[in-house]
Image (cartoon, rainbow, N blue to C red):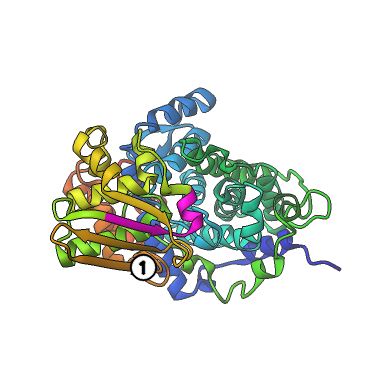
Amino acid sequence: MKENLTERLADFVAAARMEDLADSARERARIVLIDTVASALMGSRSEEVPQIERLASAVAGPGRSPVVGRPPLANAGAVLVNGYLVTATTVCDVYRPALCHVSPQVFPPALATAMERDVTGADFLLAFALGLEITTRVALGSNYPAFRANGWHSPGVWGPFGGAAAAGTLLGLDARQMRNAFSLAGSQSAGTFAHWGTPTIKFHQSRGALSGYLAATLAETGFEAGADVLTAEDGGLYGTYSDGGRPDVALEGLGDRWELERLSLRPWPLASSLQSVATALLHLVDTAGASAASVAHARVGLSATVYNMHGQLPWDNRFQALLSAPFVSAVILADGVCGLDQFTPERLKDAELDRYARENVTVVLDDTVEGTGAVVDLELRDGQRLTDRRAVPHGDEQDPLSIDDVTSKFLAAAAGVLPDEVAATALSRLERIDELPGIDGALVGALPGVTA
């Protein structure tokens, strides 16, 4: 008899306790949590966030559920806005085996649920970790190449499962309720690459968070759903959205090997697939003094997958610029750094920078580059040549961001948004969230701008 994947994952989540979480997985979850809040702080600078807030107010109305650094809303609205904040400036995590951003769908349902329950910081960290783990495992089992070939976008399809796991853990769902929560999450799975280059590609994360929250909340009432939304013969997501997937891979090492430890974090607010380009260019800036003044021509080689997504994308607005390999390369060489200040309307309209991106930067499909790697060749004005090749970017699992890296990212994101002392206090509390006894200290005091 075929194993019920949805049930197996639900049993695992419902039975999990903090002592089951490996020390390395607990530390990684803590780092990802700090990175998530940093991403949300940076997201408040996105011009689309007020539009999402208007949507949230229209469909959910006023309320007291916390939004990071912004006014509270009703629960569903807060989940929508927090989900968008985390992903808004393309600086959140990515699970590369399935090209899935994970924390935007997991953190908001956990936060909204935690604020209504008597939970400790450790409770919250466990729920967050389980949400990360379930998203990555369900996504891994989908057989991503076949899934992607059908046009689907992972966060909106698999993210709701993680949101349901996180919220369901804090609600105390039993195994059957958790199975129903997962099936309800899957019944809301959606999002395709037809929206690439538009803000809707980020709304998939926001809506995925809400789907997970609704799924867990409805499951708590005893609402029933299909027994196995993932691998059912008729309508299972693995068969409908992919080629049947690989359920065995989703379960491999469950509870012993924590897939969440493979999450990649982004040092720079760029498309996840352009992080290698930034890694290479900034290394040449730092070690060889490369700059727009010294570089006559830059050649950036990308794999076919990355080139097709980013190689020729225009930079008509900030979001597209963050995804555009030519603009990213030009502005890094021009400014020597890479942050949101490189993608302001003023920089996008800079005629000299625009000319340099069009005339001095060539982005090509390079068959020697694999995955999300990159090769950068610079021809200097004095005739010298510089080259840097990256198989993976800084921030990937092979070269992960340290706690010091994420701390720096948090403080940079908070600069100009929070007073220095408030940011320092918030960071300190997040770093020891699992030691804090109650919800007030663990979350309200730890998340800048959040009030109950």
Residue extending farthest right: 1
Q: Is residue 352 above or below residue 431?
A: above
Q: Could you say where residue 451 lies in the image, as x and y percent from the top left?
A: 35, 39
Please tell me which residue is depicted at 55% across the width and 67% down the height of the picture: 17
Please give the residue where the numbered disc 1 appears in the rendered image: 390
Is 299 inside the magenta-drawn segment?
A: yes
Q: Residue 30: name its quadrant.
A: bottom left
Residue 218 vs residue 89, the one in the foreground: 89
Q: What amino acid does circle 1 point to?
A: Arg
Q: Quadrant of the C terminus?
A: top left
Badge 1: few (under 14), some or many (20 or more) residues near its Cα, within 10 Å? some
Magenta stretch, residue numbers: 298-308
Q: Does residue 232 appear in the picture of this structure?
A: yes
Please tell me which residue is depicted at 50% across the width and 41% down the height of the picture: 196
Q: Could you say where residue 200 lies in the image, as x and y percent from the top left?
A: 50, 36
Residue 140 vs residue 23, the one in the foreground: 140
Residue extending farthest front: 383
Please tell me which residue is depicted at 40% across the width and 41% down the height of the picture: 88
Q: Quadrant of the N terminus?
A: bottom right
Q: Is residue 373 above or below residue 269?
A: below
